[in-house]
Image (tube, coloured by chain):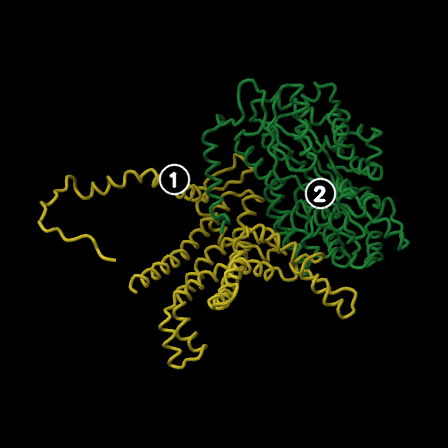
Chain colours: A yellow, B green
Amino acid sequence: MTTLTAPPKTASPPVRPRTSPRAGAWKRRIPLLPALIFTIIVTQLPFVATLVISTLQWNILKPGERHFVGLSNFKFVFTDERLRTAVLNTVVLTASVVLISVVLGLGLAMLLDRRFLGRGLARTMLIAPFLVMPVAAALLWKHAIYNPDYGLLNGTLNAVWRLFGAANGPTVDWVSSYPMPAVVISLVWQWTPFMMLILLAGLQAQPGDVLEAARMDGASALQTFRHITLPHLRQYIELGVLLGTIYVVQTFDAVYTITQGGPGSQTTNLPYEIYLTMFRKYEYGQAAAAGVVVVLGSIVIATFALRTIASLFREEVSR
Amino acid sequence: MPSTRYALIAGAAATALLATACSGAGAGGSSGGGGKRINVLMVGNPQMEDIAKLTKSTFTKDTGIKVNFTVLPENELRDKVTQDIATQAGQYDVATIGAYEVPIWTKNGWLHELGSYADKDTAFDKADLLKPMVQSLSGADGKLYALPFYGESSMLMYNKDVMKAKGVTVPEHPTWQQIADIAAKVDGAEPGMRGICLRGLAGWGELGAPLTSVVNTFGGTWFTKDWKAQVDSPAFRKATNFYVDLVKKHGEAGAAQSGFTECLNAMSQKKVAMWYDATSAAGSLEDPASSKIAGHVGYAYAPTVQTKSSGWLWAWAWAMPKTTKNADAAAKFMLWASSKKYESLVGDKLGWARVPSGKRASTYAIPQYQKAAGSFGDITLKSIEGADPANPGTQPRPTVGVQYVAIPEFQDLGTKVTQEISAAIAGKTSVDKALNDGQKLAADVAKNYQK
């Protein structure tokens, strides 16, 4: 395309700014101000209120006993054994879901990166789990798959056993016997498509000439993958891991629906524990304090995520 | 992902609360003026859906009072109604609450006294209400604070065909030992069939309800009269061990995840031979549309050990928050909804099996109802009458209530302790450890009440 703007032949008289640049900038911002104020109100005020509430002893069922207790709710959050377990469960749950789904997503993305008949259809179907509502997905796993009576897993076991002449297969109570894997697997099913999408984008952004050069130099497929594809994908993987982490940390639906945090508190993660504090214990102060701690943790992770995105953009620009 | 930021729920909800709290008493959501429109919040049970259908053509037509219904599932209802009433938001003129909430909310001064309205309405016939119902819906001052809509106790339900095939007779008043023996005998009577269904799903209103009724009859209690925690006492231990052993050995598949709904399913699909649960389950078991054993169910009283009866007691009842500005119209609605007239209206229009029963002695004398509820009506009535909410075990209690402790902390305490016991059922921990941990939690709660 050619540029149409030709340089002016005669020097036009310099336009004198009528107002200072600062004021001009503000003038341009004025129409945006209502939106800005609205955003501040809806995003920041609740947080400020949460901060205030986190310093109160406030049980909604005991009116008249609400009073200021300083930081003792935070002390409770950091010393309570159940909350410590919840933190640990949250870490285990998040780390395993994100890592497994990145690995599976990478594998699927590599497959989808090749040309084959029906690729579009395969891609659409692979993305589908990510589009299912979390609650619906959790219900599906709980009832259609894990249920010991009529679930798919035990049904398959029974069918295999019957092939060999036995009357009934073993009745495995999946959710009670393997609570954490049960939750993790259902979430991996949901999150693998997300990772796959990001990594597929990365793979398709791979410069073809470099790959061709590698092939000409006699590099094996494995070598090409290790030394060219993987380094190229690094930032996409980082992005997937960080975005995935931010969302999976907040997992509620799967825990609530599949295990109710149990057995015991083996799958109780932070969001579910906060829910219990809020709606079973009605201790608003404690719930708010725990919420503040989670938000601070999420901000730390989010900062890393934003940095990764920024570095991705830098790479694009420098190319 | 559309999952909500639960971290911020606390903030958002609390801000809403603050806002309503600040605006104070002026925040009445219901329309002022003539008071010819009331807002009703109800739990989404079939009986409530029926009344939502019938109100316009009868109650509104007769009185001119329009009724707006909000229907929510039980857990959401509790959250919403608690917050609405606790913050004095005053959005609702009538709300359905359970027997657990009445004493707690009454103590907080959140509810309107209703006994005087009931006394004034002669057609209502307050004396006809079952005594345990009145008792569990009254405050410490002895006044009635909620009008029962329907009530339930608990009983043992069994598959008559299986018992016959195995040559077992279930006594009308069984002991828990007899039930354990029968469960062992009928376990595996049909391929994949287990002996008994007992709730194993964590939750004060799930596993907590049947387990507490078993603890009561084994001579245990959550707290003594002077607020000493008893969760690790020998009787509580014995009862819990018995319950957990029975479920582990002969209970339903997936016991640790089975609540009322799962057991109803297992029983009606012939996956278990017996089921100990709410009397209100009978209506569903006898419905041929959803149940494979309709017409083949036998009923027995809740099994006992040391007490004469051990059925629990629950009621869904109408209550009026003090914040209402339409007290008279609201009272009219509540009295109508709990009346004999409404029961026969349901019987005529929707069928007698759907009558909201379990609250009035006269219901069980109606010939059409007797016919519809033939096999279980009598046991239901006698179980409710036999329940003693003030004294359900072998020792005096600090609060009124059979399968729960009527203190605000119990929702949390019961949920956490049953989580551990549910883990014991799943084989992830021992009953001893569960109860030792539970004792610590209970002792913490007890401190709030000891003098």
Residue B8 percent across, percent down from the top left: 46, 46
Q: Identify which residue is drawn at 89% across, 51% down.
A: B164
Q: Is residue B72 left or right of residue B249?
A: left
Q: Is residue A39 left or right of residue A250?
A: left
Label 1 SS: helix
Please state, as top left, top right, bottom left or bottom right, where the C terminus of chain B lies in the image: top right
- Residue B361 visible, this angle: yes
* Number of marks drawn: 2
The residue beneath circle 2 is B403
Residue B113 percent across, percent down from the top left: 64, 25
Q: Identify which residue is drawn at 44% across, 79% down.
A: A220
Structural crowding at the residue carrying mark 2, measured as other residues with C-alpha within 10 Å and reported as few (<14), some (14–19) or many (≥20): many
Q: Find residue A41 and name its label.
A: 1
Label 2 SS: loop
Residue B333 percent across, percent down from the top left: 65, 24
View extreme (bottom): residue: A218
The image quarter in which residue B101 lies: top right
Q: Is residue A4 left or right of residue A257?
A: left
Identify the amino acid type marked 2: Gln
Q: Identify which residue is drawn at 19% across, 52% down.
A: A5
Residue B246 lies, with reference to residue B316, above or below; the image says below
Residue A63 lies, with reference to residue A214, above or below; the image says above
Distance, label 1 to label 2, CA atoms, is 45 Å
Residue A52 lies, with reference to residue B126, above or below; the image says below
Identify the amino acid type marked 1: Ile
Chain letter behind tag 2: B
Residue B385 percent across, percent down from the top left: 79, 35
Nearest to the observer: residue B264 or residue A316: A316
| Disc 1 and disc 2 in contact, CB within 8 angstroms | no
Which dot, 1 or 2, sits closer to the camera?
A: 1
Q: Are marks 1 and 2 on the same chain?
A: no
Structural crowding at the residue carrying mark 1, measured as other residues with C-alpha within 10 Å and reported as few (<14), some (14–19) or many (≥20): few
